[in-house]
Amino acid sequence: MSKRNVRKQTQSRKQVLHGIFAELRSILRQRNNLRRPINKFTPAPPLEDGKPRFYVMFDNTPPRRISGPKLQTEMIQLPDERIQDAVLNLAQSVWHLKDRLNIVIRTKNKSVSVDSVINNNIELQVCADLANSKKHGALGTRSGLFPKLGLVTFDMSKSGVLEFFYKGDAKQKVLIVSNPVPIPYHVDIISDNGNKTLGNSVNYIWEAFKHWWPLISDLDILSSCAEGKFLKTQLF
């Protein structure tokens, strides 16, 4: 092989590795974002007794005046397409990591198999189904579980008195709380037509991601440079 071809092949391998590094950082970033509670609030009209209240800022949409029921509750379940999309994007990132791993396998002439990892792990198969449902709009069947995301469960146990408005046809919600404290949330993966839950989606997808770790280690992906070594400290 000529020096020029060797140089091109070396550059190609570096590009592949840096692409994987970027994907791994993205997975870490997405997971961390989904684990952060909602902690943005803006003042709302006070209660009749003059006590202050606060809009929960689910996104950057300006809050609207509402008149809804007032209640106190431990939990509330609502659609939130922004959060649900973020979960599906995480599933896509974890699932499509297989494509970059396959490229590394080819460039290193390794005999290991990405498919064998997938076939032996139901969590990765569920990720495939979630990713394909996001991309193609139909419930995936690779896992045989027909998984989909449930509603978003918000922990309102420390939020005090709530006032709530929801417009179902537009999937728009407004929530006012008396205590502006961080609001944890989670989204379950449900299967079997809603008769079964696979648990917290972010935790489940992270467990699926961990099934790639032995292959990443076998391919020596994270030991080639400082960038990879730093990622290794974040993952393992």
Image (tube, rainbow, N blue to C red):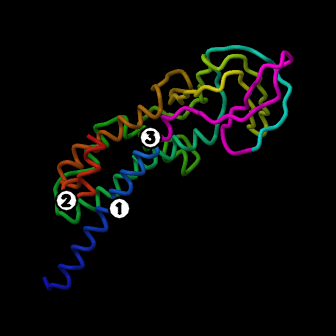
Q: Circle 1: is it few (<14), some (14-19), or many (20+) Cα within 10 Å?
A: few
Q: Position of residue 81 (x, y in %)?
A: 64, 40
Q: Position of residue 103 (x, y in %)?
A: 29, 62
Between 18 and 191, the one nearer to me in the picture: 18
Say which residue appears at 22% left-offset and 66% top-offset.
Answer: 107
> Which residue type does callout 1 highlight?
Gly
Say which residue appears at 75% left-offset and 37% top-offset.
Answer: 172
Please say whether residue 188 is one of the residues in the magenta stretch: no
Instruction: For marks 3 and 1, give the CA distance.
Output: 19 Å
Instruction: For marks 2 and 3, give the CA distance.
Output: 25 Å
Please give the range of residues in magenta.
Answer: 32-61
Q: Position of residue 73 (x, y in %)?
A: 66, 14
- Disc 1 secondary structure class: helix
Say which residue appears at 22% left-offset and 55% top-offset.
Answer: 221
Please say whether residue 51 is one of the residues in the magenta stretch: yes
Q: Circle 3: is it few (<14), some (14-19), or many (20+) Cα within 10 Å?
A: some
Say which residue appears at 36% left-offset and 51% top-offset.
Answer: 24
Quadrant containing the C terminus is top left
The label shown at residue 19 is: 1
Q: Please, is residue 182 above or below residue 21 in the view?
A: above
- Disc 2 secondary structure class: loop
Between 65 and 222, the one nearer to me in the picture: 65
The label shown at residue 121 is: none
Instruction: For marks 2 and 1, give the CA distance.
Output: 14 Å
Sequence-wise, which precedes: disc 2 or disc 1? 1
Mark 2 = which residue? 224
Mark 3 = which residue? 31
- Left or right: where does residue 161 sit relative to residue 19? right
- Disc 3 secondary structure class: helix
> Which residue type does callout 2 highlight?
Ser
Q: Circle 2: is it few (<14), some (14-19), or many (20+) Cα within 10 Å?
A: few
> Which residue type does callout 3 highlight?
Arg
